[in-house]
Amino acid sequence: MATRNPQTQAKRARELAVREKRERKRARKAELAEMRAAGIDPYAETEPESTASEDDAEQADGEPAVDDAA
């Protein structure tokens, strides 16, 4: 039984990697197309929402509030 040439193994590994990369790209494009079809912009920038607890943590003078829960 003949052994495989190391170059052949490397070539097959490269081909497999390219094939898997293409499949991942197709899947990602399909996912983005579904989002656009649903009316969602996948590339829309959203601003982080501040929570009320963060706003309450700072006083008017800019210093963090100290909870005196003893």
Image (cartoon, rainbow, N blue to C red):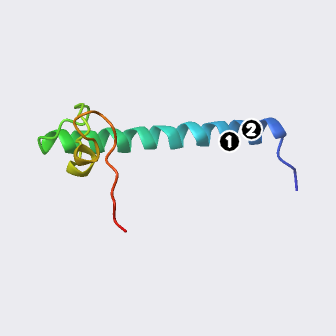
Q: Which mark is residue 26?
A: none
Q: Which mark is residue 10?
A: 2
Q: Residue at x 27, y 40 (%)?
A: 32
Q: Quadrant of residue 26?
A: top left
Give the image location of residue 51, x and y in percent: 23, 48
Q: Nearer the viewer, residue 24 or 57?
A: 57
Q: Is residue 6 left or right of residue 55?
A: right
- Which residue extends farthest bottom? 70
Q: Residue at x 26, y 31 (%)?
A: 43
Q: Residues within 10 Å of mark 1 (few under 14, many from 20)?
A: few
Give the image location of residue 34, x and y in percent: 21, 45
Q: Nearer the viewer, residue 34 or 70?
A: 70
Q: Residue at x 88, y 56 (%)?
A: 1
- Kindly report the distance in space between the C-alpha atoms of the residues bearing marks 1 and 2: 5 Å
For the residue labelled by badge 1, is the local secondary structure a helix, a strand or a loop?
Answer: helix
Give the image location of residue 28, x and y in percent: 36, 41
Q: Quadrant of residue 7?
A: top right
Query: At label 2, which amino acid type do we have?
Result: Ala
Q: How many marks overall?
A: 2
Give the image location of residue 64, x and y in percent: 34, 43
In the picture of the structure, the residue carrying the numbered disc 1 is 13
Q: Is residue 37 left or right of residue 32?
A: left
Q: Are marks 1 and 2 in contact (CB under 8 Å)?
A: yes
Q: Nearer the viewer, residue 1 or 53?
A: 53
Query: At label 1, which amino acid type do we have?
Result: Ala
Q: Quadrant of residue 60?
A: top left
For the residue labelled by badge 2, is the local secondary structure a helix, a strand or a loop?
Answer: helix
The quadrant of the picture occupied by the C terminus is: bottom left
Q: Residues within 10 Å of mark 2 (few under 14, many from 20)?
A: few
